Image: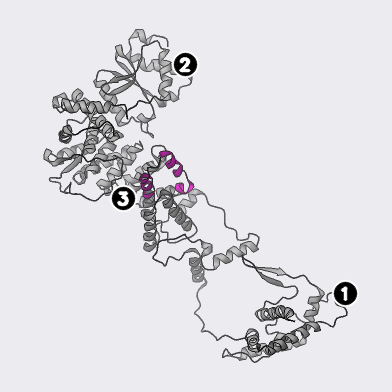
Amino acid sequence: MEGLLNPLINQSCLKPFGLAPRLGYPLPVITRTGILLRKLEPCTLGSNYLHLGGDGARSSRGAVIAALDGDDKGEESMMDWEAEFIGELDPFGYRAPKKRAKKQKSKLLEDTDGMDWCVRARKVALKSIEARGMTHIMEDLVSVKKKKKKPKKKLVSKKKTVKKTEDIEDIPDYSSDEDLGEPQTIEDLDGVGDLKRKVSLIADGMYLQKKEKTMEEFVNKLSQFSGPSDRRKEINLNKEIIEAQTAADVLEVASETIVAVAKGLSPSPLSPLNIATALHRIAKNMEKVSMMSTRRLAFARQREMSMLVGIAMTALPECSAQGISNISWALAKIGGELIYFSEMDRIAEVAMTKVGEFNSQNLANVAGAFASMQHAAPELFSEMSKRASEIIHTFQEQELAQLLWAFASLYEPADPIFDSLDRVFKDHSQLKSSIGEKTSNNHEPINVGRSNASNGSLGSPTLTLNRDQLGSIAWSYAVFGQMDRIFFSHVWKTLSHYEEERISELYREDIMFASQVHLVNQCLKLEFPHLQLSLSSELEDKVARAGKTKRFNQKITSSFQKEVGRLLVSTGLEFVKEYVVDGYTLDAVLVDKKVALEIDGPTHFSRNTGVPLGHTMLKRRYVTAAGWKVVSLSHQEWEELQGAFEQVEYLRDILKDHLNERYANTTF
């Protein structure tokens, strides 16, 4: 009896809630993903069950409805729950009407008297419930309560209701002041998204998501920063970006936010400041672990990274001067000189409109980024030169060294800067040296507070330069041949005080410093002997030995140079390879004719315009001043030649103006 009782009780409990199974109607089945409606197959059993709900059911239905309508106090109705349990009442009128199409009965039940066995079973179950003292429990389960009437709400227009629903669907809950955790998707918000997902499963993909938009449309959607903003969201996102420990962590935070914005997060926390911060922190974390260039390039080619850079380029006009500075420096560190061609052109275009807002730090970082990428931007550098000359008295030591190095590296004219330095630093006492202090890299981002090195006044600013800064500034002046300037003389005299300092041949920084100083000293002796600024013989010997060491100055012969060398052998001319002139190594020379053939690969030219870089121009000028005829063989022109015959003809053409007629008529 108990085995029969449980399913009966279950059915009776479901029935008042409209969940009792009926013939021909869907039966709700609860699954992990939702509620599925399953339709029962018709049979004679169901037909006889319907026969139970005849006139009695219809008559009792009216009584139940009347009882419900008449009870305004929310109390339990007085209808007979026992009759309902047995099946004599149908409070919600779910029974089928009396008149229905007759269905063929099963032969197995032809001799049974309707569903009397089911009624009898329920009566037996009812007696068992009463005997166990569980009447009040069944009464609570079966009896229908009427809820109290609630005051009517004011009608809201359809337009406002739709807007409110959209807000609920699209905006995650950022009510907490904690950092953003794993971002929510639209489907996780309230129950609306969950319902959509379930319906999409039931309706055979009726509500499947639209196909992903193209990258251009995607970026355009994310670039709408002119609307309302949420300061708290932006601060939380910025905090999470800064606290990320690795470049991958920063990119993950940024990409998750990008996806959330694409799905409707509004207002977007992807402010121009946060975008610039994300790129800057990615590059900074790469520097922290000294990530190899190959890994950086692989990181830069990730889809998420490409999206972040694309969004940055779109948001660039709304970035501050500091934001432009951070983005340019970050791209230089991530991509080096191999990628981000169009991006750097875009930065140059936007930076042109905001040069007037640049401070000394912004000027140094932007210029340094372009120089380290060997990316020429003549118009931008012209404007930055003017701006730097106006605020030259505000520059810190490292800012000034990096700015001059950048202009010299790209061989961009810097006359306004030189004029301002001569005007502001007239007295040698305004320059001081800090012996023993070194900078690790001329390309590092400058992001330091104001020090006491410069008092910020136009009258008498002072600079305390370390060894490497002095060497970099001196080399920059040598590239432009501006060693007769007042400021250069102050720098060079200050540098001469390092005579007693030991220059080691074991450290790259020492070798770089020695190489720069050696070249500058040679230029002084050759081009400006009247200035009498060359180093003392003892210091000159130390610098020369360190600069010539092979530890960090090993010559690497490129495939391009080897290919040209093979053709030079076939000319019959006595070319000498790797010939050294005062610290410079010439690729191939005709010693008796003092003709130097320089085989210049890509590293000698800017990557976007093909203009010779500063170190190439300095070498050509110095070798020329030393009495040699310099012939440059450019890799750009060489690659356009077809076959050895055209290459030999090209060599003859560029050499004939520097050889006598006997050599010029020689058949190569």
* Disc 3 residue type (three-letter): Gln
Query: Pointer 2: what residue?
Result: 645
Q: Secondary structure at mark 1?
A: helix
Query: Pointer 1: what residue?
Result: 107
Q: Position of residue 461 (x, y in %)?
A: 15, 45
Separation of residues labelled 2 and 1 (CA atoms): 103 Å
Q: Position of residue 428 (x, y in %)?
A: 12, 38
Badge number at residue 322 = 3
Dividing the image into 4 quarters, which one contains the C terminus?
A: top left
Structural crowding at the residue carrying mark 2, measured as other residues with C-alpha within 10 Å and reported as few (<14), some (14–19) or many (≥20): few
Q: Is residue 421 above or below residue 595?
A: below
User: Do we see residue 89 in this rendering?
Assistant: no
Colouring chosen for the image of the structure = one colour
Range covered by the magenta-colored residues: 280-306
Is residue 261 rendered to the left or right of residue 77?
Answer: left
Query: Residue 134 or 625: which is nearer the viewer?
Result: 134
Magenta segment's dominant SS is helix
* Disc 1 residue type (three-letter): Lys
* Disc 2 residue type (three-letter): Phe
Dividing the image into 4 quarters, which one contains the N terminus?
A: bottom right
Separation of residues labelled 3 and 1 (CA atoms): 89 Å
